[in-house]
Amino acid sequence: MSAIESVLHERRVFAPSAQAVADATVSGMDAYKALCAEAERDYEGFWARLARETLAWHKPFTKVLDESKAPFYTWFEDGELNASYNSLDRHVEAGNGERVALVFEADDGTVTNVTYRDLLARVSRFANALKQRGVKKGDRVVIYMPMSIEGIVAMQACARIGATHSVVFGGFSSKSLNERMVDVGAVALVTADEQMRGGKALPLKNIADEALAMGGCDAVHSVIVYRRTGGKVAWTEGRDHWMHELSQAQSETCAPEPVGAEHPLFILYTSGSTGKPKGVQHSTGGYLLWAAQTLKWTFDWKPTDVFWCTADIGWITGHSYIAYGPLTVGATQVVFEGVPTYPNAGRFWQMIEKHKVTLFYTAPTAIRSLIKASEADAKVHPKSYDLSSLRILGTVGEPINPEAWIWYYENVGGKRCPIVDTWWQTETGGHMITPLPGATPLVPGSCTLPLPGIMAAIVDETGQDVPNGQGGILVVKRPWPAMIRNVWGQPERYQSGYFPAELGGTLYLAGDGSVRDKDSGYFTIMGRIDDVLNVSGHRLGTMEIESALVANPLVAEAAVVGRPDDTTGEAVVAFVVLKATRPQGDEAVKLANDLRAWVGKEIGPIAKPKDIRFGENLPKTRSGKIMRRLLRSLAKGEAITQDVSTLENPAILDQLGESL
Ligand code: WT7
């Protein structure tokens, strides 16, 4: 870890315009510093003030932070609220029922507007439908759906009745879906017949049926299906129900169920450094507070804005910045079903123009792939569109390289729009380290400074602070309201994984390496320090892919590492030893394709290795540990400089260095 050093030589600084400062809620660095000072001075008072101002409480809280069971912290514990009430009813009651909540654009370009009043009625009907199917407060409901109005309705309906949802990204395989349904103890599954992406219909219900048939899901009494395409699906009478049929029969009022602030709003699975994904458990009060508050601070959200976050509801970004944050503040937002390259790579820019988007939030991977596409075809270049509505741009999920940052700034933002490079994680619930658009001078590639109240720091392997300019481990020193509450059903994994004893047991370990600039104190994220890869902004555990590979009857051993990739940030490279002799030529190519498809089936297409290499063996130390650092060099095609004298069979390095 001591090898993490500052690689940032970026010297360009972009100060916010006088206009941006004047318009902003957090106006200027002094305003930012005043908020930070307020949090330093009276930590609990600061959070209590925000929680009272931002949320509507059914029963006000009297306690703020309870650290007595650390690291199982609680926030606002005796308060009661309902997330769906905060997202919907509140705005209708305030006279904003006719405001458009969702501008939904389908894959084929069809647009549907849903007002807050409509959305409340839809959510209430479906909440009643869930109740009729016997779903109760505290039950877990798995949602395996496309980007859709109905997906958001399903999440909000769970929140309305106090059921805890667990959304599984529609790109995951039946096996991944099964594992998550079993682990979370689901009683119901909400899915769709098919999903439309890039002009193609892809199955969901069929995969869900496969997942349910894999066993362990006996508790799932209801499968509720949104009819998206009308494609043919198998049907299990009694268990399967159409979403529209169930909803039609219901009343459009449903009293929101007040829950305690600590009640789990949702569980979202994410990859870690073991073979099994972990269910990140979030709260209701603290989580919702931060989803809303960060929208106001980081995106400087105003009622006149049109917000668009391009993430999928299957990831945390889609939870915080589609399903909850924008609705809690009462925003109008664009929701997109499709992909950025269909019908062509100008889709994002065309949609920004059409819907007059003011706040745009996407991933560096998308930006990098659209840069390439626009270099090849001027028609899809952002300059061919009117993007003058844009006010603020955001990025999330992975480090953005300064070249891509500058391109985004100049070509999409017209050198006018601040870029907020937001560092956060599934576990943090919302933004943690990010510029504020009307305050922070921007440096391309740096996520700059922590939000007020977020005590981020960089420490060494023993938990001691390191000076600015020296790389180290990114930690958060104090609990914050939106933080992960537990790993579902695995409290030891929560405690040892996020509050490791080696660091003293009280620091939240993010799992990223980072460095702060000597002068400005700005943070730059250096990537993961654990066995986690970041491919296109999606988190993948190397162990998870290795377990998937060795589950194949032909495979004896496998090791997976990441390799830098121009478009996806990192790419998956797998080193595989077969039980039979090492394949060569066409046979190796065919086997590699089979194994890729296998991983797609085991986990999902996002986890498919880009590169597979076969060897007679893997390089190991005398004690039998795989030399991953060496594999990383081989994956990059670098010359081997490490000491390989302990290798039993150095010839395998030539084998493993050979790409197919
Ligand atoms: C990991 C979290 C946050 C929602 C999407 C991903 C990386 C995230 C940034 C950023 C550099 C970033 C980190 C982090 N990451 N944002 N702005 N700059 N790296 O959520 O799947 O929980 O992954 O994504 O490595 O630990 P996630």
Image (cartoon, rainbow, N blue to C red):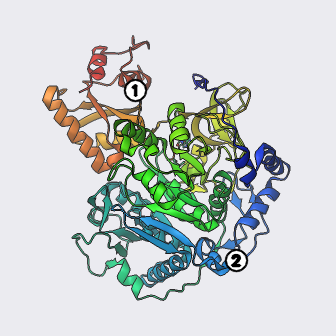
Image quadrant holding the C terminus, namely: top left
Report, in whole angstroms, how far the alpha carbon at label 2 lies from the one at label 1.
Answer: 55 Å
Q: Callout 2, which amino acid?
A: His
Residue nearest the observer in this picture, 481 or 580: 481
Corner quadrant of residue 440: top right
Disc 2 packing (10 Å; few <14; some 14–19; many ≥20): some
Q: Secondary structure at mark 2?
A: loop
In the depicted structure, whether residue 288 falls above or below residue 545: below
Q: Position of residue 143 (x, y in %)?
A: 42, 66
Residue nearest the observer in this picture, 559 or 216: 559
Q: In percent of the image, x 42 and y 23: which residue is there?
A: 623
Q: Position of residue 134 (x, y in %)?
A: 44, 81
Disc 1 packing (10 Å; few <14; some 14–19; many ≥20): some
Q: Between disc 2 and disc 1, whose residue precedes? A: 2
Q: Position of residue 156 (x, y in %)?
A: 52, 71
Image quadrant holding the N terminus, namely: top right
Q: In percent of the image, x 61 and y 48: which residue is there?
A: 495
Residue nearest the observer in this picture, 305 or 253: 305
Q: Secondary structure at mark 1?
A: loop
Tag 2 residue: 58
Q: Is mark 2 within 8 Å of ligand 1?
A: no
Q: Is residue 328 left or right of residue 357?
A: right
Q: Is residue 457 left or right of residue 160?
A: right
Asked if residue 466 can be seen in this view, the reply is yes
Tag 1 residue: 626
